[in-house]
Every structure is written in structure tokens, then in C-alpha cells.
Image (spheres, helix red, strand yellow):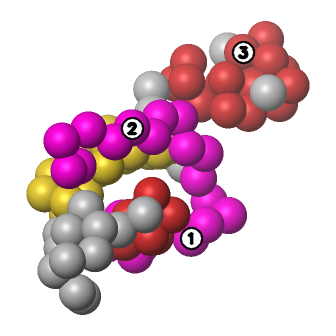
Amino acid sequence: MNMNTALNSEHALHTALIYAGIEKEEFDCLLQRYEDGLYHFLLRTYWMKYEFYVEDRTGEILGIQTEPLVYREVLDVCGSAGAALSAVA
């Protein structure tokens, strides 16, 4: 990558998705922020939350944190199916 050219947010997000093995169709982007040369993304898939920091000049992933969604968050993602599950539980 040309060291004089900063990544745009779309390219930085694509880099993070490849790093984590996430397909574009599998996630919701909950937060996207740019500050001090870093892109910060908070993503959610059906079962996991991901937090990435991507350096804008090199595209290097400087940090990633993964966390499984807790039961209540899974119900929120499920929508009406989640309401039916909670009624059974």
C-alpha cells in the first residue's frame, strides 16, 4: 500500500472484515469513528460483537476485541422470534 495515502473508511472496514473472516452480509455496523489516524469499528453478527482499530496509513489492525452476545442481546437481534423464545423461557 502507498504509505502516503490514507485508507478511506470503506477500505478500512473491508480490511477488518477480512481479518476476522466476516462476510459483508453477516454484520451490522453499530459504530464507526475516525480519530487520530485510527478507524474504530464496532460490529455485531448474530452471535458475536467485534471491536476493531485500523490504522489509516498502513491498514494494519492495531486491535481487535471479540465478545459473544449475551442472551438478552441475542433476543434483541432475533426480533419477534426472540419474543417467542422469551415467552417459552
Quarter of the image for the C terminus: give it: top right
**Mark 1 or mark 2, which is nearer the start of the sequence?**
1
Question: Do the numbered discs 2 and 3 sit on residues whose CB atoms are within 8 Å?
Answer: no
Q: Residues within 10 Å of mark 3 (few under 14, many from 20)?
A: few
Q: Where residue 31 sits in the image (x, y, percent)? A: 47, 35
Q: Is 83 part of what is drawn in magenta?
A: no
Nearer to us: label 2 or label 1? 2
Q: Is residue 31 above or below residue 80?
A: below
Q: Where residue 38 sits in the image (x, y, percent)? A: 23, 49
* CA–CA distance in space, label 2 to label 1: 21 Å
Name the residue at 79% across, 11% down.
87
**Mark 1 or mark 3, which is nearer the start of the sequence?**
1
Name the residue carrying label 2: 33
Name the residue at 20% across, 50% down.
37
In the picture, residue 85 is in which quadrant? Answer: top right
Residue 56 horizontal side relative to residue 10, left or right: left
> Which numbered marker is on residue 23?
1
Q: Residues within 10 Å of mark 2 (few under 14, many from 20)?
A: few
Numbered range of the magenta stretch: 16-38
> Which numbered marker is on residue 86?
3
Quarter of the image for the N terminus: give it: bottom left
Identity of the amino acid at label 2? Arg
Nearer to us: label 2 or label 3? 2
